[in-house]
Image: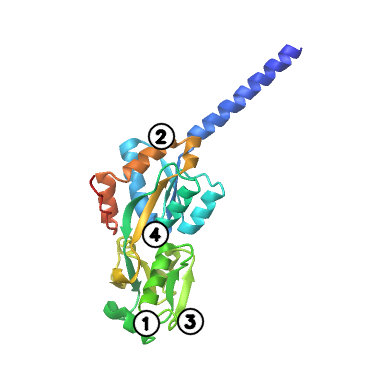
Amino acid sequence: MKKTFAFRILILTLLVCLTAAAQLSAQVLRIAVAANAQQLIKRLQKDFERKTGIKSEAIVGASGKLTAQIMNGAPYDIFLSADTAFPEQLYAKQFGLQAPKIYALGSLIICGKTDLDLKNWPKILSAHKAGRIAIANPKTAPYGKAAEEALEYYQLKSKISSNLVYAESISQVNTYILTGAVELGFTTESFLYENSDQSKLKWARVDAESYRTISQGAILLAYAKKGKLTEATKFFNYLSSASAQQIIRKSGYHLPVIKKS
C-alpha cells in the first residue's frame, strides 16, 4: 500500500511539473513598452513574428510605472523605455541581463487642433493665447520631463502653470489633443505618423536645444530566464537589425549613431 501511495504521489508530482512546464512554454514573449511607442511596437511585433515565427504581447504604459512594476516582479521579458534612465536603474538593481542599449531617438513637438500658427509657440504661450496645455507626468513619462525642461528653458513654466494639464502618459496627452480636451499638447513627433488625418492638426518641433536628448533604451530583463530567454534575446538583437531600424525611422524617430570600434 505504501509503495502504491508513493507511486501515485510521484505520478501526480510529475503531472503537475509537466503542466507547469507546458503553461510556461505556451506563454508568449512579453514586452513592456513606453506609451509613446505603442504604435511602433505593433509594427515591430508584426515584422518580428513574420521573420521568426515568435509571437509576443505588448504591455503599454508610462516608463516610470512599468519600471516600478518590473521591480515588483511583473512578468516582462523585454522593456522598451522612453529614456535610458529607467533601464539603467533596472540594470543597476540587477533586473537586467545586460546593459541597456539605445534603439531610437525621440523628437518633441507641440501640437493641437487649433487655428494658431505654432512657429513661434513660446511667444504664443507667453502671451496666454493658448488655453489648456497638456504634458505627460514628468516623474514617470520622459516626454513629459522633456516638455517641462523646454518650458523652463523658455522661462514659461511658472507663467502658464494654471493652464497646464498633467496626463498619466504620452498616450493620454495624445487623446486629449485628438478629442480637443486641450488646445495644445507636448507630445512625440511619432504621433503625427500614427494619425492618417493630420489636416486638423497644427504642430511645430520644439527646439532640441531646450531639452535633453530623448534616447530611448531597451533592456533584456532577468525575468526572461524563467522561460523566454531565447525569444527575448532574439527580439533584443532584432531591434538593431536593418529591418527594425527602417520601421523605427519610418515611425517618426531618429536612429542612434552606432560607434564603430
Distance from the alpha carbon under mark 1 to that under mark 4: 24 Å
Q: Are marks 4 and 2 in contact (CB under 8 Å)?
A: no
Q: Which residue is mark 1?
A: 125
Q: Amino acid at mark 3?
A: Ser
Q: Which residue is mark 4?
A: 36
Q: Amino acid at mark 1?
A: Leu
Quarter of the rendering containing residue 184? bottom left
Which SS class for mark 4? Answer: helix
Q: Which residue is mark 3?
A: 162
Picture residue at 45% right of the left edge, 48% below the top: 91
Dot 2 or dot 1: first in sequence order is 1
Task: Looking at this view, name the residue that lies furthest to the left.
Answer: 260
Picture residue at 54% right of the left edge, 47% below the top: 74
Distance from the alpha carbon under mark 3 to that under mark 4: 25 Å
Is disc 2 surrounded by few (<14), some (14 to 19) or many (20+) residues within 10 Å?
Answer: few
Q: Amino acid at mark 4?
A: Asn
Distance from the alpha carbon under mark 4 to that under mark 2: 27 Å
Distance from the alpha carbon under mark 1 to that under mark 3: 12 Å
Report whether residue 174 is seen: no
Q: In the rendered view, does 218 fall on the left or right side of 3?
A: left
Which SS class for mark 2? Answer: helix
Which SS class for mark 1? Answer: helix
Quarter of the rendering containing residue 63? bottom left
Dot 3 or dot 2: first in sequence order is 3
- Most foreground residue, 181 or 138: 138
Dot 4 or dot 2: first in sequence order is 4
Is disc 4 surrounded by few (<14), some (14 to 19) or many (20+) residues within 10 Å?
Answer: many
Q: Which residue is mark 2?
A: 230
